[in-house]
Image (cartoon, rainbow, N blue to C red):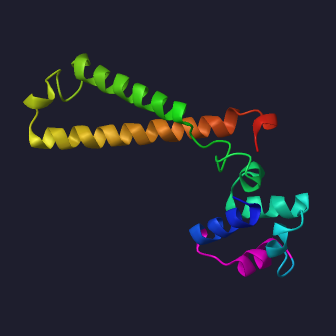
Amino acid sequence: MTLVERIKTLCKEKKTTIAELERKSGISNGQIRKWDTSIPGVDKLNAIADYFDVSTDFLLGRTDKKRYYDLTEKDEQDIQKELQKMLDGLSTSGHAAFDGRTIGELSEEELEDRELLKASLESSIRLAKRVAKQKFTPKKYRN
């Protein structure tokens, strides 16, 4: 996928036009379409990346990760392991509302509560992992 194609895709996702993007990012009218045959300046590329909140490497096609702090497949696996460990700890601790009962022994309301708790924990772990990546990724590895 070329630079212009990636920009067009991002415009569709954000429901904006290339002309509007050029106006908002301070790029002259019709300039982006010329990037199929010419090379944009670093300042213009950074302006586009900032507008869409993506890395310049993503725009240039060097990576499929839009942001350096996006979660990888390994991160997703780690989240599922941590979530399962937490749920197992709740089931066996005796302090939880489930008191070590198996899923078959829980009422329908308790099953719904368990699913809500699971979704909440997963969301919290995911958010914490993203924040940690943003905060602790060395600057030389960003973008």
Is 19 above or below relative to 105? below
Q: In this view of the protein, which residue sits in the foreground, 48 or 116?
A: 48
Which part of the image, by quadrant, shows the C terminus?
top right
- In the rendered view, does 78 fall on the left or right side of 106? right
Which part of the image, by quadrant, shows the N terminus?
bottom right
Percent across and percent down for residue 36 are 81, 68
- 18 in magenta: yes
Percent across and percent down for residue 74 are 53, 30
Q: Where, by quadrant of the figure, is residue 4 drawn?
A: bottom right
Q: Where, by quadrant of the figure, is residue 12 drawn?
A: bottom right
Q: In this view of the protein, which residue sits in the foreground, 92 or 40?
A: 40
- Numbered marks: total: 0
Residue at 57% over, 67% down: 13
- In the rendered view, does 76 fall on the left or right side of 91? right
Percent across and percent down for residue 132 are 61, 34
Q: In this view of the protein, which residue sits in the foreground, 53 or 101?
A: 53
Residue at 36% over, 22% down: 85
Residue at 13% over, 43% down: 109
Percent across and percent down for residue 7 are 70, 66
- In the rendered view, does 52 fall on the left or right side of 95? right
- In the rendered view, does 114 fall on the left or right side of 41? left
Magenta residues, start to end: 14-27
- 1 in magenta: no
Is 92 above or below relative to 117? above
Magenta-highlighted stretch: main secondary structure?
A: helix
Q: Where, by quadrant of the figure, is residue 116 drawn?
A: top left
Residue at 35% over, 26% down: 84
